[in-house]
Amino acid sequence: MEQLSAVPDDKRQAIINAGMSVFASAGYKKAYISEIAARAGISKALVFHYFGNKKSLYLSLVEYASNLLLQEMQAELDTSLTDFFDKLQDVVKVQMSVLKRHPSLISFITSIYFEDDPEIKPTLHDAYLQGESTRAQLALDGSDSSKFKTGVDPKLVLEILLKYTEGVVNNRMGANQGFEETYDKFEQCMTLLKNNLYKEEYL
Amino acid sequence: MEQLSAVPDDKRQAIINAGMSVFASAGYKKAYISEIAARAGISKALVFHYFGNKKSLYLSLVEYASNLLLQEMQAELDTSLTDFFDKLQDVVKVQMSVLKRHPSLISFITSIYFEDDPEIKPTLHDAYLQGESTRAQLALDGSDSSKFKTGVDPKLVLEILLKYTEGVVNNRMGANQGFEETYDKFEQCMTLLKNNLYKEEYL
DNA sequence: ATAACGTTGACCGTAGCGGTCAACAGCGCA
DNA sequence: TGCGCTGTTGACCGCTACGGTCAACGTTAT
C-alpha cells in the first residue's frame, strides 16, 4: 500500500540524473556507483542491472546528455531574434529552463571535457568535445552592434554577461535561491545595461 | 650537480599548496595523500613525516589558510578609498594578487564551508566558517552611491561585478589565460560600467 | 499455482587507501 | 676517511570499500 510499483523508467531516469550529478562533481574515477545508487534512492545492484558496468553507464550518460542538450537547445531557441540583448536573453532563458529540468546536465557536459581517466578518455569521441563555446557565437552571430553607444564594445558587454551567467551556474550548487529569483535578477541586470549602453533612440 | 638539496621549508610549502588544491577540489574523504604527494613532487611518506596524519594535515591547512587570507587582505586593502568603483577595484585587485601567489587558497577556504565529513566537521570551529560574505560589505560600506545616475541601483551593479569575478575565479582552473589579461579585462569592464552608469559630472 | 519481472542484501576478490619503518643518500665535522 | 645526522624514500601492512555477481524475495499477471 505504501507505494504502488514504480514504472522501471522512473528508476532509470533517477539513475541518469544521479549519475550525471555524481560524475560531474567527482570525475569518473572517484564517482562511486554506491553513491549514485544512494542519490537515486535505489540499490547498487539495480544500477548494474540497467547499465551493465561503470564504464558503459558513463558512456551512456555522455551520449544521453549530448543528445538532450542539443535537442533542447534547438527546440527552444528563437532564431528570429536579432537584437543583441534579446538574443542573449533568449539563450540564457533557454539555458536556465534546461538547468531547471535537468539540474546537472550542463555541469556534467562540462565535466566530460576535463575528464582524462585513461579508462574512458580514448573512447570519448572528439565529436562530443566540441559543441561548447558556441554560446558566444549564438549571441553575437547576426546581431547588430550598431545600437550601442559609440565607445561601447559589444564584445566586452557579452563578456560581462557571460561571466555573470557562469557565476550563476557554478554557484547554483549552493542552491541559495530559486530559479525565478536568479533569472529575475539576471533580467534586471540586462535591462540596466541595455538602458545605459544603448543609444537613446533605440530605447 | 642535478640539484642542490632543497631546504625543507620548500617541501613543506609544496605540500601546503598541493594539499589546499587537492582538498579543495576533491573534499576531505576523496583527497588522497598519494595525490597530494605526487602534485607536490615528493613521496607520500614525507607528508606523514611533516604533518602526522591526514586529519592533522587538513586542520593545519585550515588554520594556515584562514590566517593567510586574513593577513593578506588586511595588509593590502586600501581603506582610504570611498568611491564605489575604486573600492571594488581595490578588493578585486588584492584578491587577484592573493590568487596569483596562492592559486588555490580561496577555493580551499570556500571548500571548507561545504565540508561535512563526520571525521572533521565537528572539529571545525565555526569561527573559520564565517569570514566570507564580507566582500559585499567591503565594497559597499562607506562608499557613496550618490554618484550613480538616477534609476541605477548600486546593489545591482555590485551584483553584476561580484558574479563576474566569481565566474573568473571558478574558471581559472581551466587556466585559459594569464592573470594580467584577466585583470585587464575586468578593469575594462569596470570602466565601461563607470563611464555609463555615473552621472557626467563625476567622470 | 506459477511464471516472469523488478529489486535487493549479502557476498566476493581486489585495488588502493592511510599509515609505518628500515634503510639510504648526502653533508658537515672530526 | 670515517661517522653520525638530517631529510627522504620504497617497500610494506592491514583494512576499507570499491566494482561487480547472484540467489532469493515480493508483486503482479496469467
Image (cartoon, coloured by chain):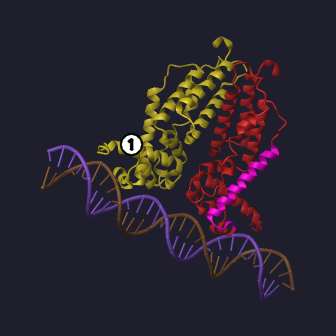
Chain colours: A yellow, B red, C brown, D purple
**In this orientation, does residue A115 appear?**
no
Q: Position of residue B23 (x, y in %)?
A: 62, 55
Q: Nearer the viewer, residue A130 or B23?
A: B23
**In this orientation, does residue B174 appear?**
yes
Q: Is A136 contained in the magenta span?
A: no
Q: Position of residue A45 (x, y in %)?
A: 36, 55
Quadrant of residue B13 within the rendered picture: bottom right
Q: Which residues are magenta?
A: B50-76
Q: Residue at x 62, y 21 (%)?
A: A191
Q: Residue at x 49, y 22 (%)?
A: A79
Q: Which quadrant is the N terminus of chain B positioned in?
A: bottom right
Quadrant of residue B51 within the rendered picture: bottom right
Q: Position of residue B20 (x, y in %)?
A: 66, 55
| Label 1 sits on residue | A13
Element assignment for label 1: helix
Looking at the image, the residue that sits furthest to the top is: A201
Mark 1, chain letter?
A
Q: Is residue B200 left or right of residue A195?
A: right
Type of the residue with mark 1: Gln
Q: Is B54 contained in the magenta span?
A: yes
Instruction: Please say if C6 is above or below B84.
Output: below
Q: Main secondary structure of the magenta part?
A: helix
